[in-house]
Amino acid sequence: MPAELKSTTHGRTMVLTLSNPEHRNAMGPEVYAAGVEALNAADSSPEVRSVVITGAGPWFSAGGNLQRLLANRQRPPEVQAHSIEAMHSWVEAIRTFPKPVIAAVEGAAAGAGFSLALACDLIVAAEDAVFAMAYSSVGLSPDGGATWSLAHAVPRQLATELLMAGERMPARRLHELGVVNRLVPHGGALAAALEIAEKLNERAPNVLASIKELINDAPAATLARQLASERDQFVRNLHHPNGGIGIEAFLAKQPPRYQ
């Protein structure tokens, strides 16, 4: 059975499920393309306020399919390059998607699976989940933005250890480092991620989009440039209908109902 990306809805949240149980939800080009397509659909739908990415069964994702990678060694290098570019398109789509994306991790997120989780805005993980940058264990270097994500998330020495040693890192350790947002009991990652998503769904979508854009731009921006961006986003959101809705609801001590 080929790898699939199944899409369902839970209230105002789109749930994307990596499904390839035979290979621990290993991914391939068809999954990456489906991921981009799903986010495009979610972006254009006002009914969708957030996205949760999870894995079918007891795993999040084992990353790339090693059998496919082995077969690609017998094909022109461009074949694998195109596959990686497809994954990178999905990673970029997640990063630039204007709505929150939450990874719900059970079991293990390895290799490209770890990269995918890091691309999300928030990570919810089961207490017994593990994360591994397994590339060096099979003689490969990272993809999926792993080096960028880890270099921005943790000290250089830890990023180097994770990427070079390829050892399993318990979810609890990543939680202590601030990479994992929330630890939950085994089997509870998806439910907890949906709970967080629903809370975010109550916020003004335009404001969440502004926050995500500002966070994405901050590492490369000077303070002056970031201050200017914050000014522009603030003014834009103040004059958005949701700005009036939020302020008036707060003053009236009532819950806001954003558009």
Image (spheres, grey):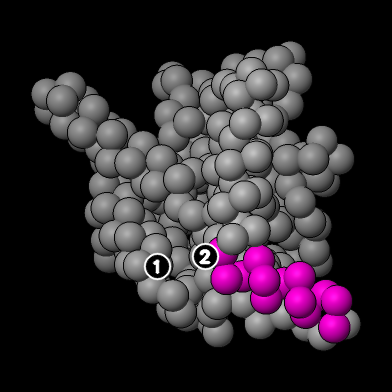
Towards the viewer: 119 or 114: 119
Task: Residue 107 in the image: state x and y as whole percent.
Answer: 64, 56
Q: What residue is at 16 percent from the left and 31 percent from the top? A: 79
Mark 2 vs mark 1, CA separation in Å: 8 Å
Disc 2 crowd, CA 10 A, few/some/many (<14, 14-19, 20+) = many
The image shows residue 186, relative to residue 222, as above or below, that is below
Towards the viewer: 223 or 243: 243
Q: Which residue is mark 1?
A: 42
Residue 203's image quarter? bottom right
* Residue 250 colored in magenta in the image: yes
Whether residue 105 is visible to the viewer of this picture, yes or no, is no
Q: What residue is at 44 percent from the left and 34 percent from the top? A: 144
Q: Amino acid at mark 1?
A: Ala
| Residue 146 appears left or right of 153 | left
* Residue 53 colored in magenta in the image: no
Q: What residue is at 43 percent from the left and 61 percent from the top? A: 18
Q: Amino acid at mark 2?
A: Val
Question: Circle 1 — which element?
Answer: helix
| Residue 207 appears left or right of 136 | right
Q: Which residues are magenta?
A: 240-252
| Residue 84 appears left or right of 112 | left
The image shows residue 90, relative to residue 187, as above or below, that is above
Q: Which residue is mark 2?
A: 51
Instruction: Kindly check if marks 2 and 1 are in contact, taking CB atoms under 8 A apart as contact.
Output: yes
Question: Circle 2 — which element?
Answer: strand
Towards the viewer: 206 or 39: 206
Report the disc number at residue 156: none
- Judge depth for marks 2 and 1 and give the one in front: 1
Q: What residue is at 39 percent from the left and 63 percent from the top? A: 43
Give whichever of discs 2 and 1 has the lower sequence position: 1
Task: Residue 221 in the image: state x and y as whole percent.
Answer: 60, 22
| Image quarter (top left, top right, bottom left or bottom right) of the C terminus | bottom right
